Image (cartoon, helix red, strand yellow):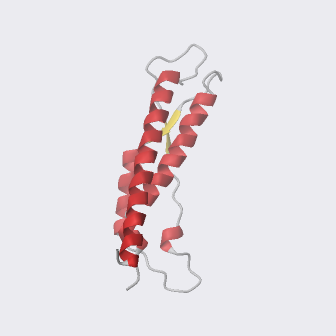
Amino acid sequence: MAINFNNALGIHEQALQLKVKRSEVLANNLVNADTPNFKARDIDFQAVLKGQQGATSTRLQATHSRHIAPSSLAFEPQLQYRNPLQPSLDGNTVDEQVEMTRFAKNTMDFQASFQFLNGRFKGLKSAIRGD
């Protein structure tokens, strides 16, 4: 019997990719903390994840050998502007403390997801070997 990685891994692969993208966005905010009129951006992780779960529940099938495989379809999360707690006089909305905190939490979430997926792969490997 063939192993279906979509069933085995679920939404966790997309969640990991989303956390990487969010790290890039948060890092960009931090880099531009002193740029006049720069507007801090972020990704609504929960909204994107819910959208991905809905897309995952709708099973796509390739009906022709030249069709793009459904699992290879890329998603691009929509960036949102962050409402500043206290906007600066130069129009910049980056709060370095907020961005650093969110970046650190996103990094920890990434590590947790990565360890979860690593455990799944170890379990699959053990099942294949018959351990």
Residue 86 versus residue 129: which sits nearer the camera? Answer: 129
Picture coordinates of residue 64 (x, y %)? Answer: 53, 86
- Residue 68 in sight from this viewpoint: yes
Horizontally, is 95 left or right of 123 in the view?
right
Picture coordinates of residue 101 (x, y %)? Answer: 45, 29
Picture coordinates of residue 15 (x, y %)? Answer: 43, 53
Q: Residue at x 47, y 31 (%)?
A: 82
Position of 104 relative to 59 (above/below): above
Q: Residue at x 42, y 71 (%)?
A: 125
Residue placed furthest toward the front:
131
Position of 100 relative to 89 (above/below): below
Instruction: State which quarter of the image contains the N terminus.
Output: bottom left
- Residue 11 in sight from this viewpoint: no
Quarter location, residue 5:
bottom left
Horizontally, is 44 left or right of 65 in the view?
left
Q: Residue at x 34, y 74 (%)?
A: 131
Residue placed furthest toward the top:
89
Position of 98 relative to 8 (above/below): above
Quarter location, residue 32:
top right
Q: Residue at x 54, y 25 (%)?
A: 94
Picture coordinates of residue 19 (x, y %)? Answer: 48, 47
